[in-house]
Image (tube, rainbow, N blue to C red):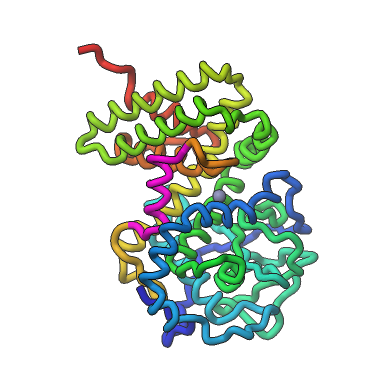
């Protein structure tokens, strides 16, 4: 894995067709969804949970990283750096080339991106976003002007830009400054595309997106601390893992049925009402699909190495993503807040890819219920 912060070749001037053409950009404000305030903590917590794997990875890569650390530590915080731009260009290239494999229609979707540091948020891919965004004078991104505003509570999530949404994430320098270890650029690009998928959800399925955010109000009622409940979640994760690893589709279906049975029994025992069922299914839609996209992007990027320009992807999954699958298999009941739903939703989406490959093309993003789709795909247990 090599990362050259200042690639010898300038990024190809890639601009998606029709990017933001004709969009109206009224005043921007961050929607006051309560969950948005959680998102900065969320990525840090999510990554912290992967620390054992990351430390291992970091030890392996220490030599490499020390050779490739940013040569510009005293960077200006008032504009995107050459490294930021190269990474953004690469993320857009991956989205263009691989996006439709990850989610039909994603490649060509016009989605602005925000990168932020302690001082500013920088917005690319938007036209005239309006106050308080100002043009970054004397600079451009891929030949087009871009914007900034003072960073006030920036979010690693989808951020509303007038009537549309942008995927928002810290710059890699900023994130590495907040983290006890260095994130590698390959993983970082997958994280950007995770946030861009949230913007896609918000743009394409606004009512569902709002519904998903609204279920955070049920979080305080969720029985995280109930031991039996947590044990059942652990068993669900194990069954999902068995299904993902199954040697054939029949075995995968059996493990999916087992997962659904454990889930149904857990809810019945906990006397779940519709609110808490919605808490699970909506967060599996919101975060499970984004996690699914993040990992699919990584896997697909590794398979088309020729498309990557500044980041080398290794075949297979890196340890920090591999650790997600360990948590899925062994520790799902210990994941706090919404973190378990990233994993359970991701696993269900991967199983749908396996057992019903056309599910994404056939489904309406607004209406997707991963669990219901899986129930339909595996059907009832056969008695013989
Ligand atoms: Zn997310």
Q: Nearer the viewer, residue 80 or 323?
A: 323
In-image side of 95 versus 84 (left or right): left
Residue 349, percent across and down?
41, 40
The image quarter in which residue 20 lies: bottom right
The single residue placed furthest to the top in the displayed view is 383
Q: Nearer the viewer, residue 321 or 116?
A: 321
Residue 65, percent across and down?
43, 77
Q: Check the image and report above or below for 181 versus 296.
A: below
Q: Nearer the viewer, residue 38 or 85?
A: 38
Residue 231, percent across and down?
46, 29
Q: Check the image and report above or below for 328 versus 39.
A: above
In-image side of 1 versus 132 (left or right): left
Quarter of the image with the C terminus is top left
Quarter of the image with the N terminus is bottom left
- Does the magenta-highlighted stretch encompass residue 302? no
The residue shown at (45%, 27%) is 232
Q: Check the image and report above or below for 376 versus 150.
A: above
The residue shown at (34%, 25%) is 258
Part of the protein shown in magenta: 317-332
Q: Main secondary structure of the magenta part?
A: helix
How many discs appear?
0
The image quarter in which residue 375 lies: top left
The residue shown at (42%, 83%) is 67
């Amino acid at each position: 894995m090599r990362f050259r912060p200042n690639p010898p070749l300038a990024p190809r001037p890639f601009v998606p067709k029709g990017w933001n053409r004709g969009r109206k950009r009224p005043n921007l404000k961050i929607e006051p969804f309560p969950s948005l305030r959680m998102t900065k903590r969320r990525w840090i917590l999510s990554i912290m949970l992967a620390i054992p794997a990351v430390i291992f990875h970091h030890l392996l890569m220490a030599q490499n990283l020390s050779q490739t650390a940013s040569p510009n530590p005293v960077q200006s915080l008032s504009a995107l750096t050459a490294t930021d731009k190269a990474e953004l260009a690469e993320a857009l290239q991956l989205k263009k080339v691989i996006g439709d494999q990850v989610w039909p229609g994603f490649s060509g979707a016009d989605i602005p991106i925000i990168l932020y540091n302690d001082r500013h948020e920088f917005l690319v891919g938007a036209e005239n976003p309006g106050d308080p965004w100002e043009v970054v004078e004397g600079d451009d991104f891929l030949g087009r002007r871009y914007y900034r505003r003072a960073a006030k509570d920036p979010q690693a999530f989808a951020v509303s830009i007038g009537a549309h949404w942008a995927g928002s994430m810290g710059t890699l320098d900023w994130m590495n400054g907040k983290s006890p270890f260095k994130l590698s650029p390959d993983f970082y690009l997958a994280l950007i595309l995770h946030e861009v998928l949230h913007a896609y959800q918000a743009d394409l399925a606004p009512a569902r997106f709002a519904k998903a955010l609204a279920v955070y109000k049920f979080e305080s009622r969720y029985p995280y601390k109930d031991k039996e409940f947590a044990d059942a979640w652990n068993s669900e994760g194990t069954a999902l893992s068995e299904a993902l690893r199954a040697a054939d589709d029949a075995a995968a279906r059996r493990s999916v049925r087992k997962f659904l049975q454990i889930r149904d029994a857990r809810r019945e025992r906990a006397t779940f009402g519709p609110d808490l069922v919605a808490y699970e299914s909506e967060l599996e839609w919101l975060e499970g699909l984004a996690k699914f996209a993040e990992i699919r992007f990584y896997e697909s990027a590794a398979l088309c190495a020729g498309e990557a320009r500044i980041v080398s992807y290794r075949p297979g999954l890196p340890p920090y993503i591999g650790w997600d699958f360990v948590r899925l298999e062994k520790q799902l009941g210990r994941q706090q807040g919404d973190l378990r739903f990233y994993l359970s939703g991701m696993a269900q989406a991967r199983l749908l890819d396996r057992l019903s490959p056309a599910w994404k093309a056939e489904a309406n993003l607004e209406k997707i219920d991963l669990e219901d789709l899986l129930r339909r795909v595996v059907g009832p247990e056969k008695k013989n």
